[in-house]
Image (spheres, helix red, strand yellow):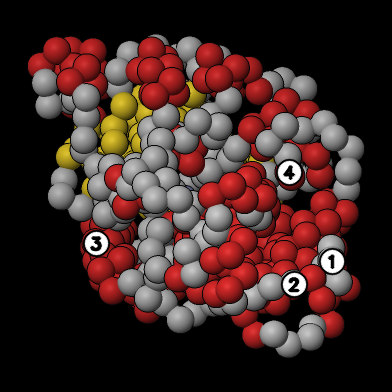
Amino acid sequence: MAKIDVNIKMYRVGELGDCFLIHFTDGTATSSVLIDCGSFRNGGPSVERMKAVAADIKTQQKMAGGGPAPFDVVVGTHQHNDHLSGFVHAKDIFAEIGMKEVWLSWLDDPNDEKATLIAKGQRKLVDKLQKISALLPAMATAGLTNTVGEPSAADHINDVLGFYGLAAATADSSPAVPQDGINNLKSLGKKVSYLSPGQILDLPGLAPGAVKVYVLGPPRDNDLLFDINPGKGESYESKLTAAANVADGLHSALTNFDDGQTLAEEGFFPFDKKFTRSLTDDEFMNSAYKKKENHWKTIDQEWLDQAEQLALYLDTYTNNSSLVLAFELVESKKVLLFVGDAQTGNWLSWKTIQWNNPAISLDSLLQKTVFYKVGHHASHNATLPEYLEKMTNPDLAAMISVDNSDPNITKPNGWKMPAANLYKHLKQQTNFRILRMDGKYEPDCDPKLPEVQKKWGSLFANIDDKAAFVSYTVKG
Ligand SMILES: [Zn+2]
């Protein structure tokens, strides 16, 4: 069987986001795969950048296929803005290129009963959090949401809603860009498949058996799908319902502050209405609530902390819903691992998969891995240390889709991407062979430096650093 070379282009989307264009070739036939295309924000500059990325991809498709070659496969890993916004903002360009197949996870399958229930619960929680988020500016004006110099719970909620294209800071009026992205993929794909763990597919566009694609996640197991720390035996329905109910109560309590109307939701309130005070009631605020000695009794930040927990819960769940694929080049026994933003629960589920062939084992897939797309922009809990430890192939290289100019990273107490300990471990496992979207390297793994190029050895020739993307070729 022919050996397969694989070229992986990581597009520079200018902020947090994933866009990977991959060409597999046996020297004659080429299979083109696009995994995600999105960036965190939906304002003008982000939209323009996504259009430019899509236009470059179109050019690459022409070069690879001798015409405007349609993608053999487009993968949407999970419903976050930073992975799907391009399919909304540059839909026309993607329509011109065309998509023979679209691969989504079982969670996007409209005929999957469990997926439909989960989507409903998720939608409800997002709606509630969006309403809560809309109330936050008024609370900030009242001086109730922030301690000067510290990021507030309100900031954290908006951060999470940003993944859904919903943050107040975005200029976009569309309520749900990621959902639109998935819908666009469904309409653009000539064939749409919804994948579940344990499935093994042939890569379309090449001879059957040349490249095997193993589906590792997202898990169908509720505990693993919904928990950062799995093992608490509650069902997905009760968890999302409970979260949405808490959001209900929280939202009612917050709305009660500003219009004085009696609401049906007051059944959720802990106290009778006659005990309530308006935040704009100066007498109450100045005489009691804002007094220094009463500071420990104030509750505004507590409410928000609860909302923040809900927002983080939602975020973890959505990251865990990532479609995880391992591409095996059968002849050379090399594996490329793309995990989207999968967090701990998703990773842990891989060892529970029952493959239809007993010869397949997770450990051997990890051992054969020569390319790893680092999970969730290299945050602290999206690469399981135990499994990274098992990626022992001497040729292992990694790509991190991080942009250290992203405001979520540069702000005070911003997101830790890449997380220091993970970065250290990655350097160890890859022998410093790490490519970053933003090209911002520490001296010990800067591929522009001769001592680092030595660590890459003959693999250094496989890097191509361009303005629009950085690419790496795995030779079969
Ligand atoms: Zn992401």
| Residue drawn at the location 50% of the way across and 74% of the way down | 138
Which residue was labeled with disc 2?
A: 276
Task: Confirm or deny contact between disc 2 and disc 1 (CB under 8 A).
Answer: yes
**Could you tell whether 306 is left or right of 388 in the image?**
right
Res. 414 image quadrant: top left
| Residue drawn at the location 72% of the way across and 64% of the way down | 250
Dot 4: what SS? helix
As measured in the structure, the alpha-carbon distance from the residue carrying label 1 to the one carrying label 3 is: 59 Å
Give the camera-side residue of 332 and 283: 283
> Residue 403 placed where, x, y %?
30, 45
Up/down of 343 relative to 74, above or below = above
What amino acid is at disc 2? Thr
What amino acid is at disc 4? Leu
Task: Confirm or deny contact between disc 4 and disc 2 (CB under 8 A).
Answer: no
Which residue was labeled with disc 4?
A: 225
Up/down of 173 relative to 33, above or below = below
What amino acid is at disc 1? Phe
Which residue was labeled with disc 3?
A: 56
| Residue drawn at the location 80% of the way across and 39% of the way down | 223
Give the camera-side residue of 14 and 360: 14
**Could you tell whether 232 is left or right of 258 in the image?**
right
How many numbered tags mark residues here? 4
Identify the mark at residue 23; answer none if there is no mark: none
Of callouts 3 and 4, the N-terminal one: 3
Front: mark 4 or 1: 1
Give the camera-side residue of 402 and 218: 402
